[in-house]
Amino acid sequence: MSLRYALIALLTGRPMTGYDVSKSFSSSVAHVWHAPDSQIYPELNRMERDGLLTSVEVPWGKKGTKKEYHVTDAGLADFRVWMESPLVPQRQRDPAYLKAAYFDFAAPGSVREQLRQQQAYWEEQLRMLEGTRATLVDRSHPTLAARLSKLNEREAELAVRYKVYAYDGLIARARTELAWIADGFALVEELHGS
Amino acid sequence: MSLRYALIALLTGRPMTGYDVSKSFSSSVAHVWHAPDSQIYPELNRMERDGLLTSVEVPWGKKGTKKEYHVTDAGLADFRVWMESPLVPQRQRDPAYLKAAYFDFAAPGSVREQLRQQQAYWEEQLRMLEGTRATLVDRSHPTLAARLSKLNEREAELAVRYKVYAYDGLIARARTELAWIADGFALVEELHGS
DNA sequence: ACAAAGTAACTATGGATATAGTTAGTTGGC
DNA sequence: GCCAACTAACTATATCCATAGTTACTTTGT
């Protein structure tokens, strides 16, 4: 059900077409919530049906049209209810930790290779997160900038600070993963030599 | 697909009935992989059908019987293939970070309340993880002990060290979450006063 | 003797998610 | 003038996962 609220959150910044939403999801918003467009388009339709969004047909080129989704008052109210409601605790389900617990079933070379892949992934994540954080701090982030233009300075300050806070959490998490991976290299070294 | 390998991993320790597996999942193994029994029983059946497990009917009381699942050589081979294969990178999908990014939509009191709930959850997690880690180090953990009895000292050392390593990662993650939550309290204080 | 708690093994249903397409119009480069 | 890349909006299928039951037998406490 969080997809629905991720979509409202995104659309409070500015009205968007399904395609825009899909692009936003695969770039910046994907850091906090990933979704493929096969989920996004149907969900946008359902949300319009449920009155959380309205759509406006916008011309595109000569013949084409595109649907631009706007958050309704009901949608915003629904979002606030969700924002105020307690969070259901996350289930632990991470294949990386499951694998690590049974690394003794794999060859040391394979373990090192997998650690390298995880390291590359998290380093890339970290770079992206730090880059995005910088665009939040200087308020150049496109979606954020669109939303800020509708707010007064006090409200803008809150919006920016909480977003930076969320990214700080993600960055801390990425660093923790990288530290764990570094420990993994050291452990393989200790147990199997270099 | 990881559920299948989590099940094989568990059953390499000792043969178990579906019920045993379900209990293990809701206690110790749930730290790395959660699954309800509505997933476990059908998956065990499919795995038996696919030749990864065999089952032995064991009498239970006067009239009852129970099915004890054993990992087959094919199952172990399949597990090793998975253990050696690269890990698909994680999708980020965490409602806590999504919410945090939009805390300005919620009342400060509600934010504090949600932070408190998250804090309680992660403190409890941390306690459990540290408790389980201790039973791994002193080799008193039941599932681990069962597996160790089939291994020589060198193999046992590897099995223990990697399991402790996995738990160290989970513990570090829990601590990172708690530090982030503490920063959240400080931020709410700064932005809205106490 | 009986009830409560525990053990065992499921099923049913709906929603969430991943993977992989499809159809059609638009823009920019050569 | 045409092709590649991009924009737009999907659909189809299968699996994963969560919630909430059901049935039936066993052990333990009183």
Image: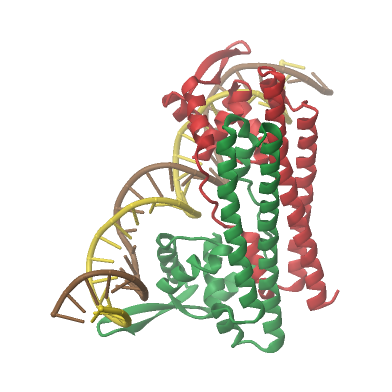
Chain colours: A red, B green, C brown, D yellow
Residue drawn at point x = 52 percent, y = 60 percent? B34
Question: In this view of the protein, can residue B62 be seen by the observer?
Answer: yes
Q: Nearer the viewer, residue B30 or B11?
A: B30
- Residue C26 in picture, x, y percent from top left: 66, 16
Res B36 → quadrant: bottom left
Residue that appears at 57% across and 75% down: B76
Q: Residue B172 location, x and y as percent? A: 70, 60
Q: Which residue is at 59% across, 25% downward? A: A11
Q: Position of residue A178 (x, y in %)?
A: 77, 56
Q: Quadrant of residue B58?
A: bottom left
At x 60%, y 20%, the residue is A15
Residue A83 locus on image (x, y percent): 54, 35
- Please state, as top left, top right, bottom left or bottom right, where the C terminus of chain A lies in the image: bottom right
Q: Is A164 above or below relative to C19? A: above
Classify A133 as above or below B51: above
- Is residue B89 visible to the viewer in this orientation of the structure? no
Q: Residue furthest top?
A: A62
Which is nearer the eye, B8 or B165? B165
Q: Nearer the viewer, residue A161 or B29?
A: A161
The furthest residue to the front: B194
